[in-house]
Amino acid sequence: MHYRLWIFQAVVCVVMALSVDSCNWSTPEAKKAGHRERGAAYFEKGQYQEAIIEYRNVVQLDPQDAQTHYQLALAYLKLGSVQSVYQAFDELTRTVELDKTNQDAQLKLGELFILGHEPAKARERAEIVLVSAPQNTDGLILRGRSFINERKYKEGIADLKKALDLDPKNIQTYIDLARVYFTMNDRTAAEGALNQALSINPRSLDVLLAFADFHDSTGQSERAETRYTQALETDPDNEAVSLRLASYYQRHTKLVEAEATLQQLASRKPQGDTPQIYLGDYYTATGQPAKALTSYRRATEIAPSSTMARDKLIAHYLDTGKVADAAPLVNAIREKDKHDLMGQFFDARIKLTQAKTDEAITLLQDALKSNPQFSGAHYFLGIAYLQKQQLPQARAAITDAIKFNPQFGEAHTALAQIHLTEGSPDLALEQAQAAIQLNPRNVQAATIAGTAYLHKRDLPKSRKMFEAIAQALPAEPIGPYNLGLVAQAEKNDAKALAYFEDAVAKRPTAIDPILQIVSIKNAQGKILEARERVIRQLELAPKSPPLHNLVGQLWLTTKDSAQAEKAFKTAIELDSSFLAPYLNLARSYYQAGKVDHAITEYETVLAKNPNASDALMMLGIIHNGRNEHEKARERYEHILKLNSRFAPAANNLAWLIAEQGGNLDVALAYAQTAREQRTEDPNVADTLGWIYYKKNTYLLAVSLLKEATDKLPNEPLAHYHLGMAQAKTNDATAAKHSLQTALRLSAHFPGADEARTTMERL
């Protein structure tokens, strides 16, 4: 009995011991230890995504674990993506909140502040370290770099030199010093610092590349190429070195050598996705989209799980207008994680192409809440605001894009265009030049710069810029067209006509040079000659709605309403969304006295097809002309129920509401809808500009109304609207000129009396 009892007691002890041991493994501390150990093992093997999962499990169990927050930050930094850097920033911030004594976390957080162009915050982190460790070289270097970023060069150099006294073999500090000296235009001191670094390690890639950059920046091209080549010979498989050499070749238009350098890198690393991505970027920059697509696709084939390759391919599809190809890839990201940064970003870009502007803005704002320094999101947020004609918001968003990425050429270009639109040619020129410096092949930026010089009346510089464009793009009309504008400014009509004819010869459907030709001939009193010129152009471009509309206008000028009606109807048949021919056809009916007949015909059409938009549109115009405003409004609203984005109806309804004392916010929404669809239509620009005028937003109004008068030089109402807006901006000289032009064109347009009164007041 005692023996059995002893056996029983022994078994119980063993079971209890096992139970206790098992319970020990299930405690939170044991779980933490297990996740932490697995995270460390994954990190050691370079499996950073897996390490992140394990470390996140630890901080979920214990949010106060400062060391694991730090390890999580290191893992995110290893991933290297835009999103992971932001996540690393969050984890480093949490680390130092929990443990201010973690010097490495403080310094890494400071480096991220430097990258984010917040030097004062970086210096705060350096000071925290230096208070407890005044001899910490990394702290001194960080503080020095923060001063340098704020252009406090004396203080910055002092800290860097202190760091060198403590660590005289720190090559990177010599390089930082050289860059400061170069910025201060002390090239001798810069070269001396680089020579000191080179004496420490003659084969240092960092020094060789820094020296190469120095030679390149000081016009010593051959010495620069030698240094870049030496660096590549030192480490042939180094991707960064190959990129620097290829970039050098691109800057010096040695495109064959640039491509060969990247191709050699790809051949040395056939299973690497990044060499293919670099090739794709090169082909994109040099205007070879087909080759770029091949490279990006190859990158995704080599590394199907590479988010960088995936994102490059999606961006390429969107940049080249292949939205249908991008959509499935974006949908896959969104289905997996609707909060994924790049998924939100690309989805927003797709929404912009679909004119779903408000949805795009919401997506981009959500992305920026989690990643406030994402320059791409700021840029496309600005583009979205531009679609809505909200220039101040667009300017602010694109300025932020440049703040967080000063090398963002497209953002500099967009901001230049905004400044130009707002009538600030000096600011436009500054941004355009920044864009050109980043990419000398940026034709849009060069065009903006040339136009800014034209607005400043600096005609020699404007001509030089457009001559360069014409030389770079000999088959395109953009160069000669703008040279024609310069010739007009020089009062040389013969030369201007020759340039405009050259532009039309390069692209028969180009409407802007033809408009300028007609404008010059009309000003010379050669109205019949102007019409014959457009008719000849129609033989070359018979399916151009703007040309048919233009020739109709010229027929109206000579009171030939039958020919005008035929031309306008042809333009509408070719493009039913084109606003101008509707307006002009209505005018032709009025001139011919066929208004009742027109109503009968359109009512007949509607009896057969109640949703015939062209008939509804013309009836709306006729009702409006008869002051039957409610009937006109019903017609326009009927059309917009069928198609909420039908520009002609949206524009006319906006005008009707604004002129009849309706809700200006509603009118603005309709006008913005029209503008999104017809960005080049001067009638839409006039409507939107006039509504901005009524809403007391005068700078926006002037910008749009100036655009309208440039394209409608013979329309008195457009000049009247511009003059009234210019008067509100206290530009008396310009206002008088615009109002005088309106009254010269017609003494009896609606608003003529107000124009006279305003001129007297001015």
Image (cartoon, rainbow, N blue to C red):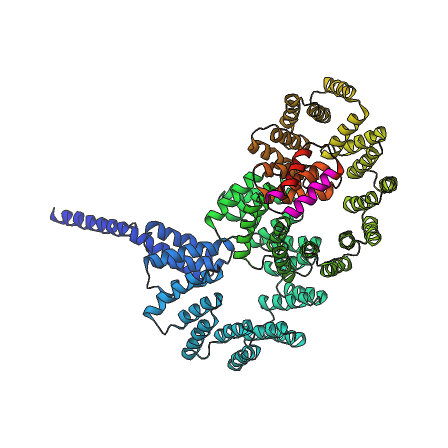
Quarter of the view holding residue 103: bottom left
Q: Is the magenta stretch mostly helix, strand or loop?
A: helix
Q: Position of residue 99 (x, y in %)?
A: 32, 60
Relative image position of residue 457 (x, y in whole percent): 70, 56
Residue 598 magenta-highlighted: no
Residue 63 visible somewhere in the drawing: yes
Residue closest to the eye, 48 or 660:
660
Residue extending farthest front = 760
Q: What percent of the width, then of the height, locates residue 167?
A: 42, 78
Query: As displayed, is residue 199 above or below residue 6?
Result: below
Position of residue 365 relative to residue 37, above or below, is: above
Residue positioned most to the left: 2
Residue stretch in magenta: 727-743
Q: Quadrant of residue 700?
A: top right
- Quick check: 487 above or below 232? above
For the question of whether residue 38 can be seen, the reply is no
Question: Quadrant location of residue 713?
Answer: top right
Point out residue 102 in the picture as x, y percentages from the top left corner.
Answer: 35, 63
Side (left or right) of 597 relative to 212: right
Left of 447 or right of it: where is 49?
left
Between 594 and 323, the one lying in front of the other is 594
In this rendering, the count of numbered labels is 0
Q: In which quarter of the image is the C terminus?
A: top right
